[in-house]
Amino acid sequence: MNKPSTASKSPSPGADTGLPVHVAVIMDGNGRWATQRGMPRVAGHRKGADSVRTLIRSCAKRDIAYLTLFAFSSENWNRPEPEVRRLMELFVSALDKDVKELHSNNVRFRVIGDRSALDEKIVQKIAGSEVLTAGNDGLQLNVAINYGGKWDILQACQDLASRVADGVLQADSIQMEDIESRLSTAGMPEPDLFIRTGGEHRVSNFLLWQLAYSELYFTDVLWPDFDETEFELALTSFSGRQRRFGKTGDQVEAS
């Protein structure tokens, strides 16, 4: 019998610094923020884009290596069509407006998710933005578009199943590392800190495999109001936690 893999239970490089190496965020509450102010929901999404820019700067300033943002889930297609259309328009506008600035600040930009359902214009802009910033070695910004954690695991398993069917791989030789290397986040450390704004306490099909040992932080603050002070509160909470990865507290203290 193969020894169980411990790949998913290892801390990220540099996790003992007190700061997370990889931060993942569900940016919830844009629509409610706007509704509370008698504004159309799209106004909340526009204001939320300012919070994204603030968070990117905050992560870069602290030398946090990876930031993954859940911008549009595979379930968000179920929202009213006008809102979906405006969200996509805002995303294209953000690419046009922000990617050059990201590049000038040494940020690498990547999109994770299923691009097959996206408009070809958006796909081309994504590809161009990724190529432009590919050589940057500062903060890596991952934006999840048409992403779902179940989809991510499924497409990894489908690839492995194809290899088994072709005789390239034996089913009983598959390890957790084989799945991880086929996820959309392959090559990245798993998130140390997961943040969700807006008062909901669930992960909503976001990075289901990758969040196995992440520290979870939930706040009632709506995303457009999530500023650097709120981010600092999340980091302070993270720094006060003991990350055991299956060990006892005494073992962690001894090491």
Image (cartoon, helix red, strand yellow):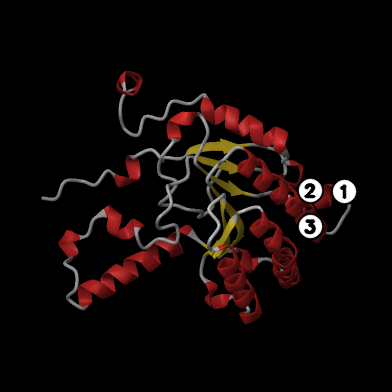
Q: Are marks 1 and 2 in contact (CB under 8 Å)?
A: yes
Viewer-side label of 2, 3: 3
- Whole-number angstrom distance, CA of label 1 to CA of label 2: 7 Å
**Tag count in the figure?**
3
Mark 1 sits on what residue?
A: 37
Q: Please name whichever residue, 107 or 231, is drawn nearer the observer in this view of the structure.
A: 107
Look at label 3 and name its amino acid: Arg
Please indicate whether residue 85 sits to the left or right of residue 212 in the image: right
Whichever of callouts 2 and 3 sits on the residue coming sooner in the sequence is: 2
Tell me the residue at 30%/22% (across/down): 251
Viewer-side label of 1, 3: 3
Whichever of callouts 1 and 3 sits on the residue coming sooner in the sequence is: 1
The image position of residue 88, as x and y in percent, is 70, 69
Mark 2 sits on what residue?
A: 33
Tell me the residue at 68%/37% (across/down): 220
Neighbours of disc 3 within 10 Å: few (<14), some (14-19), many (20+): some
Q: Please name whichever residue, 168 or 102, is drawn nearer the observer in this view of the structure.
A: 102
Mark 3 sits on what residue?
A: 46
- Whole-number angstrom distance, CA of label 1 to CA of label 3: 14 Å
**Residue 200 in view (yes/no):** no
Look at label 1 and name its amino acid: Arg
Neighbours of disc 2 within 10 Å: few (<14), some (14-19), many (20+): many
**Image vertical order of residue 57 relative to residue 130, above or below:** above
Tell me the residue at 57%/72% (across/down): 127
Look at label 2 and name its amino acid: Trp
Tell me the residue at 61%/33% (across/down): 234
Is disc 1 placed on a helix, strand or loop? loop
Is disc 2 placed on a helix, strand or loop? helix
Neighbours of disc 1 within 10 Å: few (<14), some (14-19), many (20+): few
